[in-house]
Image: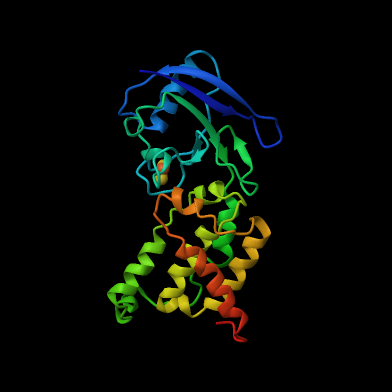
Amino acid sequence: MEITVEAWRQADHHQVGRFETYRTEVTPEMSLLEVLDLLNEQLVADGIDPIAFDSDCREGICGACGITVNGRPHGPVPNTPSCLQHLNRFPELTHFRLEPLRANAFPVVRDLVVDRSALDRVIEAGGHVAVNAGQAADADAELIDHDTAETALDFAACIGCGACVAACPNGAAHLFAGAKLAHLSTLTYGAQERGRRARAIAGQLDHDFGPCSTFGECAQVCPADIDLSAVAAVNREALRVSFRRRST
Ligand code: FES
């Protein structure tokens, strides 16, 4: 079938971007990224620069992919990364408007590629465990009940794609940050620096991202199904630390 692709073309952050329209023949089982691969082969054959976009695993694991499709981060299928958006899941669509993930915190690098290092700065600030956790064998000595482990794993599923930020009218990263806070504060070693982490992440959110107004669009696009309780974790951890003098 023939589809129309309107793709955002922008040489770099300092240049003005524009949409360019292309037509190509595809098959329904193709994913959006495979459509871009095919289109790029045609563009190169015609002597045109290929459309830059990010991808790595193409299995919904790494979070590298992320494009805005017809105004929706990742694409028409809810809670599914761009690499797993297949045309046969939305057969009525034959016109695709492809843009980068739009957010002030994500400057365009080129075409559909954005710089998501603002998310890395959140992780550097507090999305890690910095206490001495001993050797690998010591992990087995820490008994964690099943429900707690499952809760931590649910929040650890965040792949850091940034779609939540692009979906938010305020450009907030509370779903992303809350997933880290809820994940790490649930577990034994992570809980030891809970206060320091909450302060550091809150400061980084204020620096790079907008405020959360609990609209909920973030959870609707999240490919890891992180729910809005992660947003509550940001506020809960900030409130908790405001009542405590010690760093934990
Ligand atoms: S390319 Fe890895 S999640 Fe899409």
- Residue at 44 percent across and 27 percent down: it is 36
Counting from the top left corner in percent of width and height, residue 122 is at 57, 61
Residue 31, how many percent across, how many down?
36, 32
Q: Residue 235 lies in what quarter of the image?
A: bottom right
Can residue 197 be seen in the rendering of this structure?
Answer: no
| Between 135 and 234, the one nearer to me in the picture | 234
Task: Look at 52% across and 31% down and name the residue there.
Answer: 98
Nearest the eye: 6 or 105: 6
Q: Report which quarter residue 21 is drawn in.
A: top right
The image shows residue 139 at horizontal and vertical percentages of: 33, 76
* 49 to 106, vertically: above or below: above
The correct choice, above or below, for 17 with respect to 248 in the image is above
| Residue at the extreme bottom of the image, as rendered | 245
- Is residue 164 positioned above or below 134 on the image? above
* Quadrant of picture, ligand 1: top left
Residue found 50% across the figure and 40% down from its top? 72
- Whether residue 161 is visible here, answered yes or no, is yes
> Which corner quadrant holds the N terminus?
top left
Which coloring applies here? rainbow
